[in-house]
Image (cartoon, rainbow, N blue to C red):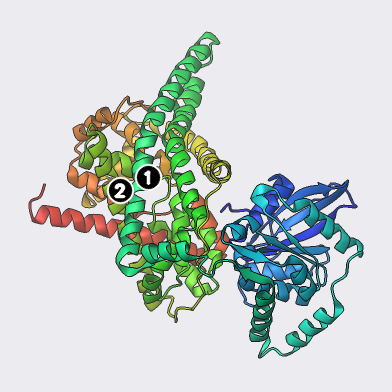
Amino acid sequence: MEENNEAFVIQKKDPTDHVLSLAGNPNVGKSSIFNELTGMRQHTGNWPGKTVDLAQGYASYKGQGYVLVDLPGTYSLMAHSQEEEVARDFIQSKDSEATIVVCDATSLERNLNLVLQIMQITPKVVVCVNLLDEAKKKKISINLPKLQELLGVPVVGTSAVKKQGLDELMEQVGNVISGNVHANPFMLEALEQIHQDEETEILALLDRASVIANDVIEYGDKDFDKKDRILDKILTQKSTGIPIMILLLLLVFWFTIVGADGPSDFLADVFNRFGNWLTSVAVQLNVPKVIQSVLIDGIYKVLSTVVAVMLPPMAIFFPIFTLLEDFGYLPRVAFNLDKYFQKAGACGKQALTMCMGFGCNAAGVVGARIIDSPRERLIAITTNNFVPCNGRFPILIAVISMFFAGTNAGFFGSIKSAAFLTGVILLGVATTIWMSTLLSKTILKGMPSSFTLELPPYRKPQIGSVIVRSIFDRTLFVLWRAIIVAAPAGLVIWVLANVQIGNQSVLQSITEFIDPFAKLMGLDGTILMAFILGLPANEIVIPIMIMGYMATSTITDFNSLNEFQQLLVNNGWTWLTATNVLLFTLYHWPCSTTLITIYKETKSKKWTLISFLVPTVIGVLVTMLTTLIAHLFHLV
């Protein structure tokens, strides 16, 4: 989920353009409707006074322009989460001229509750019954004319992925806005009467939704969801749910490690050759050596290393992760972990925000908006950093491969690396739950809130859409963010490595100063300095480490992990050093982007500082304890 700081402003291309709200429950294909109508031409901004993003896109039909505003997916408009408040506020605003409510044809009864709530606050509604193709596969038929008669507003059946029914949908939207079609006043009056009785309103709406659904839905096969129930029995039951989750995690990491190795080496070689060409061009143009060194040996080398290290694993990890998301597996992960977070005094939804942190901790922090309770939201934000983000994976994979799995062990070595990495991830998950328990019993006391966790139907992922979405919305976004911070970081590193104090550089002087403290943690000054300078982006920790050990003013390229391992061993690395680097990679401060995001989400310097200190203090204490135990038992 991308952090966005812009205020939300309707962007019309022409004063005559109409503005539409697009509402619906989560997992009903609302984004597919939005993308098909707008061609994925969208712009996002924050609703005034809130940090919730609204996406808007432009569509045209029969010469008339429409601005579609994609509202957050919600089950209701009656609760007090930011998403539900924003959805209600926009639908009722003077900007919104009509509302399209997207429903899932395979779960219509549940969706009708939101339809009725929206009809209570606006008469200009068009109901879009989506996923008719999936309903057909499950032998579910819906009498759309009768549904339209019972609701008293236009109803259109669609299948967004097959581009069916979209023209009719826009035709009905035009009729509603122009006033050619009006909502049934008797239905609106009945809903108004329900609204006046606040005590029974929710139950009355649910009852009416159930009555309508029973009148319009026919099941050709009463056991239409048998496959889903069989899968759920396997993926969510106590004895198999967690083991399968761990196995899938291991497989995802194995694919990432094996698949990224070759492309990373290829990119590194390409960037190295291009860097040499840039150097030769600079020499021919008589560019001063200082400028050459700053631009090529400093900024370019850092940027190229970040791209070579980050791009291949992200291009593999994010699509796989998105495929699992589209398939419907991630809510099952949340279901499996829900009881552990409940016991920790936190919210079960934290399992979902934790999963978001695998790609980017800043995204996980923003994702905490789905948690209604401010107390539980703070717990999720403060502990999100214990799940390693994509920027920390290269450090974990490199160290595990060099010191625990072997760099030339082939297939079995890759399995061993993936198993070690999975173990590190599970340690992070366990720490997240433990720290959530500690926070909920101390500075964030309170009772865990209850919530309804929907297990959406399993769906065949749209592979093409998944690849496009994961590459553009996740991979390139995270990569671009890393590049933005890596460029100035490269300049700072170059300055520290080239400015001399006496007979050594500033980088070496600082490294020697912090070395005694680093030794207590089983590290050394160079390693700790690399983590400190890696605050802008974890991806640059390894390049800084190499620079420090080589005591040179440039980042040195290595043709293999064997050469890198030899450099580390020559500088005193042992299994204990490698272990503590893994632990400190897992437990140390969030990157600057995540810290900025935490401040923007919490509006609190105190909680930003706590989010910085909690993982850092744990990292220092854990590495010191590991080192002490190793020396007491003469393990090194």
Label 1 is placed on what type of residue? Phe
Q: What is the quadrant of the N terminus in the image? A: bottom right
Q: Please say if 287 is above or below 51.
A: above
Mark 2: which amino acid?
Answer: Leu
Is residue 145 found left or right of 418 in the rendered image?
Answer: right
Where residue 629 appears, as percent x and y from the top left, is 14, 57
> Residue at the spot x=22%, y=40% of the render?
405
Q: Which residue is mark 2?
A: 421
Where residue 4 sits in the image (x, y, percent)? 63, 53
Residue 136 in the image: above or below residue 194: above
Mark 1 = which residue?
393
Are discs 1 and 2 less than 8 Å apart at CB? yes
Where is residue 233, by image quadrant? bottom left
Q: Residue furthest left?
A: 634
Residue 315 visible? The answer is yes
82 in relation to 522, above or below: below
Sooner in the amino-acid sequence: mark 1 or mark 2: 1
Between 146 and 389, the one lying in front of the other is: 146
- Tell me the tag on residue 506: none
Name the residue rendered at 35%, 63% in the picture. 241
Q: In terms of secondary structure, where does tag 1 sit?
A: helix
Left or right of 401, for residue 110: right
Residue at position x 44%, y 81% in the image: 447
Label 2 element class = helix
Tell me the crowding category of disc 2: few under 14, some 14 to 19, or many 20 or more residues within 10 angstroms, Cα based.
many
Question: For the residue carrying disc 1, how many other residues have a C-alpha within 10 Å: few (<14), some (14-19), or many (20+)?
Answer: many
Work out how far the residue at label 1 is from the one at label 2, CA to CA, in angstroms: 9 Å
Outermost residue, front side: 220
Q: Residue at x 80, y 73 (%)?
A: 149
